[in-house]
Amino acid sequence: MDCCCGCVIRTVCLGVVCLLWSATAFTQSLMLPTVIFGGAAASDLATTYAGLSRDGARAYREINPLLSITHSRPAPTVALGAATDAAGVWAWNRWVGRQHPKWATAGLYAAAGFRLWCAGHNLRALRQQSSRP
């Protein structure tokens, strides 16, 4: 049983709000890197949802082992991914950001770059899937 697209959008928005809250609650200097990571994670989650919810998307699957328990169902995969991102960034900002704000900033930018790469990979997979007869 899949959720509607609006449910996924609300979940992603909730994840972004949690990410913003985690940045403001602990360190003001981590606000911009946290927002950038949130945007990158949202783009990855949006392209993942698009790939998993397409008709005939049997070849498209989530390969993240933490999300494998959702069996590549679109809404639970995105919801669990957003919750994992929010918890991870909260913990990162709390424990690394307090004592090492420069390392925390670098880590968030690196994670954002990786998530943007994942979104690009998902887009390439979607294009290949749509070009098949």
Image (tube, helix red, strand yellow):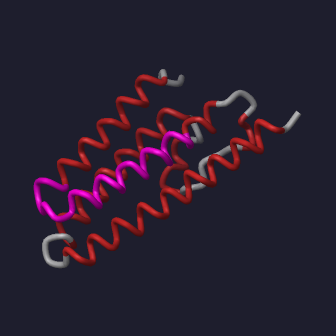
**Residue 52: quarter of image:** top right
Image-based side of 54 in relation to 117, left or right: right
The residue lying at 24 percent from left, 45 percent from top is 18
Vertical order, 57 against 85 (above or below): above
Vertical order, 54 against 34 (above or below): above
Q: Residue furthest right?
A: 133
Q: Quadrant of the N terminus?
A: top right
Vertical order, 2 against 119 (above or below): above
The residue lying at 43 percent from left, 30 percent from top is 8
Main SS of the magenta segment?
helix
Give the residues drawn in magenta, as a range. 23-48
Q: Nearer the viewer, residue 86 or 120?
A: 120
Q: Report if residue 83 lies within the magenta region.
A: no
The image shows residue 87 at horizontal and vertical percentages of 28, 53
The image shows residue 129 at horizontal and vertical percentages of 76, 40
The residue lying at 77 percent from left, 45 percent from top is 128
Q: Nearer the viewer, residue 72 or 14?
A: 14
Image-based side of 28 in relation to 50, left or right: left
The residue lying at 21 percent from left, 57 percent from top is 31
Image-based side of 26 in relation to 127, left or right: left
The image shows residue 64 at horizontal and vertical percentages of 54, 56
